Amino acid sequence: MNPITIGFILYLILILGVGIYTLRVTRTLSDFALGGQKLGPWVIAFSERASGESAWLIIGLPGAALLSGLLELWTVVGCISGIIFSWFVVSTRLRQATADLEALTIPELLAKKFNDDTGIIRFLSSLIITFFFTFYVAAQFSGAGKVLNVTFGLTELQGMLLGGIIIVFYTLMGGFFAVAWTDLIQGIIMICTLVILPLVAWFELSGMPAQGSVLEAAGLFGGKSGWSALIGAVGGLSWGLGYMGQPHLVTRFMAIDKVENIKKSRRIAIAWAVPAFFGSMFIGLIGAKLVTTGILNFNGEVIHSLAQIPDPEKLMPVMANSLLHPWVAGIFISGAIAAMMSTADSQLLVTTTVLTEDIFKRFFRKAAEGLNLLTIGRVLTVVIGVIGFILAWKSTDLVFEMVSYAWGGLGAAFGPALVLTLWWRRTSRAGIVGGMLGGTLFTILPLAGELITPRLTAFIIAAVLVAGLSLIFPDSSQAEDKNG
């Protein structure tokens, strides 16, 4: 058995061990959904970052940078800006509102805030989360298939199946405790992968005959000019809008043990994000230069052109296997799997929690009588995992594309609604419902087609709808929290 395989197996044993251990402390739906709000700043910060940056950061963004070059710098800047904005603008007020309104989920928080006795906010937001998260989970399973294919020669289907079983298992066992503590481990592995691999690749490239600057790659605008250049830059920056509306990320703000710890957690999260995003981009930029050197090999054959990499999103595992000692490569390959697991588990958890708390408990009260909601949540975890696997199996889209779709939809549906709820007293129930519907609809049916990314257009439309409908149809009363 080679060192890469041994390292990967040891990693899996560690992760599964955490899931089994945390089973002992997961006793209620509150424990399953938010870890009983007992987790400190380090765990929350790493969990938020590891959950936020999935397969797309480890394999999707390097693949995009391989093809588009320095154009992806706009994506990097947009994402880092979005992370900073979310931690400063959303985190503290959301944690306080969670305590004041005694909410376990975003749908429950919005419903209680606006005294929604009709159940429309819970029902609509739960359906939106389930719809987009199914695509998001599928993207992680697809990413796992690609990495395991390159590393161990498994078919992509076998890789997806293995990754899916592991993720569902430890989420099933320990809920938020398992997800958060495994995220801490996975976040550490991910940052090591994203910092050390591009550095090793840089030193390897520097010892070769002059290859030109890695920053030459098509320039900041991908060789475009005029409106095309502007649209490309705005498209990259628009990734930052999604952070304030991702349920699996803002749930971390809700779960931290004390409001006072958010400041410390924020510093940790930002310190993780900056080197991670730049490292991911440089894997793609440096990889593009290494392709022509004869250093990289894919399936035992030396690569001399981009055409010999059948899938640009397999660049990261190819570089790790080609440049690193097998033991180190095994750890970094685990980092790629870690990125996928840390996001998929969080999305499974949020989806099953909202379905249990906001759909089943709310609309099927008689059926819920005598049943353990924790058990229902675990059953739904398996169901959503199976649906995500089938979608990944049947889809031909790149990980980057699937994540972009789900990210944009969730960001537009919940971002404006959540921010205005926390900061604007005049936000109303009609505005929330209209904003969520508009953000979802104009992601599925983009207003500007492929010309301008729906990550931007749907978000703007949703924000206008929340504000406009709130002014037209004001609420007579709102549940008060300490934010007002």
Image (tube, grey):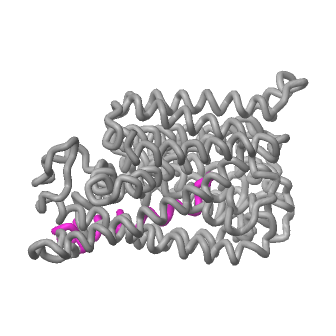
Report which quarter residue 146 is drawn in: top left
Most extreme residue toward the front, as rendered? Answer: 1
Image position, residue 113 (x, y; %): 80, 56
Image-based side of 419 in relation to 321, left or right = right
Image-based side of 444 in relation to 267, left or right = left
The quadrant in which the C terminus is found is bottom right
Image position, residue 361 (x, y; %): 81, 33
Is residue 301 placed above or below 356 in the rendered structure?
below
Residue drawn where x is 65% and y is 59% of the image:
250
Across the whole image, how many numbered discs are drawn on residues?
A: 0
Is residue 462 placed above or below 162 in the rendered structure?
below
Is residue 30 placed above or below 158 in the rendered structure?
below
Q: Main secondary structure of the magenta part?
A: helix
Image-based side of 75 in relation to 334, left or right = left
- Is 360 or 113 nearer to us in this picture? 360
Range of residues picked out in magenta = 220-248
The quadrant in which the N terminus is found is top left
- Is 419 or 346 nearer to us in this picture? 346
Image position, residue 368 (x, y; %): 84, 26
Residue drawn where x is 18% and y is 63% of the image:
290
- Is 438 or 273 nearer to us in this picture? 273
Residue drawn where x is 48% and y is 33% of the image:
162
Q: Decide whether residue 229 is among the magenta residues.
A: yes
Residue drawn where x is 55% and y is 55% of the image:
186
Image position, residue 341 (x, y; %): 53, 46
Is residue 221 placed above or below 101 in the rendered structure?
below
* Res. 227 visible in picture: no
Report which quarter residue 265 is drawn in: bottom right
Image-based side of 301 in relation to 344, left or right = left
Q: Decide whether residue 128 is among the magenta residues.
A: no
